[in-house]
C-alpha cells in the first residue's frame, strides 16, 4: 500500500506549482523582463542535469557564494530538483568562516559569483 502521507519537499511543491500554469508570469524584473513558470521549469531542469553531469547526487550539499541575484533562485531550485541542498555563504564572510562551514556541512561542490 502506498504511503498516504509521503514526505513533501520544497522542490516537489515548487515543481507541482510550476506545472499547473506554465505560462503564468512568476517573476518580473526591473527592466521589464519576465520569467514564467515554464521558464523556471526549464532552468530547474538544466541546472539539475548540469549537477548530475558532474556527479552531484541526491543528498549532496552544495555551497553557494553570491550576492542576491536571480541565478541564486534558479540554481537552488535546480539543486532541489535532484535532492541536493544549497548551503548559502555570505559574500562578506571570512575565508576561515567558509572553511569551517564547508567542513562542518560536508560540502561537495562550490558555486560562486566570480564578481564577488
Image (tube, rainbow, N blue to C red):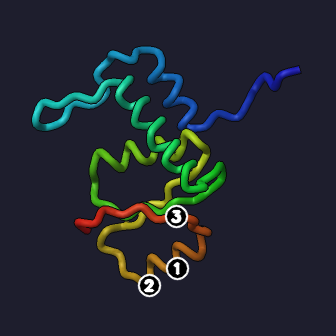
**Residue 86, percent from left and from top:** 50, 55
What separation in Å lies between label 3 and label 1 (alpha carbons)? 15 Å
Chain-order first, disc 3 or disc 1: 1
Residue bearing the label numbered 3 = 109
- On-image quarter of the C terminus: bottom left
**Among all residues in the image, which is located at the extreme left?**
31
Farthest residue to the right: give it. Answer: 1
Mark 2 residue crowding within 10 angstroms, few (<14) / some (14–19) / many (20+): few
Can you tell which quarter of the image residue 13 is in? top right
**Crowd tier of the residue under label 1, counting other residues whose Cα lies within 10 Å: few below 14, some 14–19, many 20 or above:** few
Q: Hey, which quadrant is residue 111 in on the image?
A: bottom left
Q: Is residue 71 left or right of residue 83?
A: left
Decide which of 39, 8 is in the foreground and name it: 39
Element under label 1?
helix
Q: Tell me the quarter of the picture where residue 31 sits.
A: top left
Position of residue 25 relative to residue 40, above or below, is: above
- Quick one: which residue is furthest to the front in this view? 53
Q: Which tag, 2 or 3, sits closer to the chain's start?
A: 2
- 2 vs 51: above or below: above
Q: Which residue is mark 1?
A: 100
Q: Residue at x 35, y 28 (%)?
A: 39
Could you tell me if the residues under marks 3 and 1 are in contact, i.e. CB atoms within 8 Å? no
Expressed as whole percent of the image width and height from the top left, the position of residue 67 reads: 28, 59
Quadrant of the frame with the N terminus: top right
Residue 96: assigned label: 2
User: In the rendered structure, are the residues bearing label 2 and label 1 in contact, judged by CB atoms less than 8 Å apart?
Assistant: yes
Q: Position of residue 11 (x, y in %)?
A: 54, 37
Label 3: element kind: strand
Amino acid at each position: 500500500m502506498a504511503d498516504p502521507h509521503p514526505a513533501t519537499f520544497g522542490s516537489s511543491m515548487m515543481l507541482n506549482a510550476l506545472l499547473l500554469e506554465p505560462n503564468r508570469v512568476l517573476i518580473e524584473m526591473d527592466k521589464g523582463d519576465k520569467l514564467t513558470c515554464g521558464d523556471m521549469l526549464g532552468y530547474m531542469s538544466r541546472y539539475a542535469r548540469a549537477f548530475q553531469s558532474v556527479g552531484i547526487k541526491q543528498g549532496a550539499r552544495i555551497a553557494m557564494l553570491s550576492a542576491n541575484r536571480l541565478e541564486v533562485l534558479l540554481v537552488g531550485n535546480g539543486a532541489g530538483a535532484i535532492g541536493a541542498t544549497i548551503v548559502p555563504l555570505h559574500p562578506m564572510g571570512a575565508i576561515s568562516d567558509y572553511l569551517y562551514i564547508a567542513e562542518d556541512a560536508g560540502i561537495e561542490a562550490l558555486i560562486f559569483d566570480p564578481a564577488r
